[in-house]
Image (cartoon, rainbow, N blue to C red):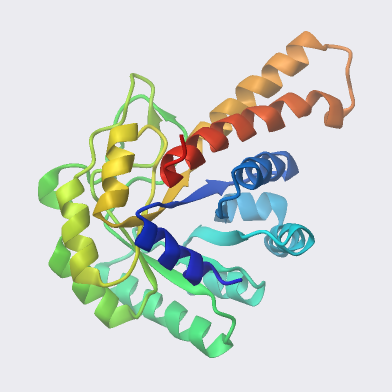
Amino acid sequence: MELKEFIKEAENNKTAIGHFNISNLETLWGIFRAAKGLNVPVIIGLSEGEGAFVGVRQAAALVKSLRQEYDFPIFINADHFYSFEKVKEAVDADFDAAIFDGSHVSSEENENIAKMCAQYAEKAGKNVLIEGELGHIGQSSKLLEKIPEDADVEESVLTSADDARNFVEKTGVDLLAPAVGNLHGMLKTGHNPRINIGRIKEIREAAGVPLVLHGGSGISDEDFRNAIKAGVSIIHINTEIRLSYRKALAKALSDNPDEIAPYKYGKEAVLAVEEVVTKRLKLFNGIE
């Protein structure tokens, strides 16, 4: 049961695998129950910050236990790790995939470190997919007052097909996350900017590897459908989960001020996460 086979199947079927981040066991259960209820594969994301809180090896063990116990295609990805050493940690912990995020370094450093990560994963022989990121889409999965200054959303600064081709050829990455008008986080005023569907198609054809759409929270359903048709095989959602979790937990605590058992007041938060993930998975998989 390897992630790359499910990615290939998604691309052939013009669907996308949902990627959802966790910060605790409640969010993991909400995501897993949604995916299992629809019988579709799912990827659990763990950022560096989330990994520091949950535990990198601990999160990998939790996901692996669900995969084995339920014989279900649930996978784990190191989402936005910012150094070779951190990606190496994820590979050694038996993650299914890892992203080297080189948005904070020069283009040359991004290429060099992404190549190091791809070479290390190959030598490790663990079938870990390495993803590279090309372009800037911001770094915070939160509610936004305005578009972040570090997000490339104007057409003139989006990832180009030529840059994507060169990056994949030089690094040997298995997956590519381009900047196509997407951004991390959700604008409080409404939908995020429209993404460039034509650019996605151009990049997929030029790069020759599956594409990953980051910053999915706030993107319109229409753009999601068109992005999948154009070549996106994995879609990341995080801010929506955090928002639904927080609202449900706050309400549960307000409604039950004397309750001190976390497993009791946390149930509503699990259900809220499951509801959000179910809706997104139906969309990504063309389920009515």
In the image, what residue occupies the spot 64% across and 55% down? Answer: 51
Q: Is residue 182 visible?
A: no
21 relative to 152 in the view: left or right:
right
**Up/down of 194 relative to 108, above or below:** above
In the image, what residue occupies the spot 48% across and 72% down? Answer: 129
What is the residue that sits farthest to the left in this orientation?
156
Q: Nearer the viewer, residue 51 or 159?
A: 159
Q: Nearer the viewer, residue 78 or 1?
A: 1
In the image, what residue occupies the spot 41% across and 52% down? Answer: 16
Where is residue 1? Give x, y as percent: 61, 71
In the image, what residue occupies the spot 49% across and 64% down? Answer: 6
75 relative to 218 in the view: left or right:
right
Q: Is residue 246 visible?
A: yes
224 relative to 128 in the view: left or right:
left
Quadrant of residue 11 in the image?
bottom left
**Up/down of 115 relative to 233, above or below:** below
**Up/down of 235 relative to 278, above or below:** below
Where is residue 162? Give x, y as percent: 13, 69
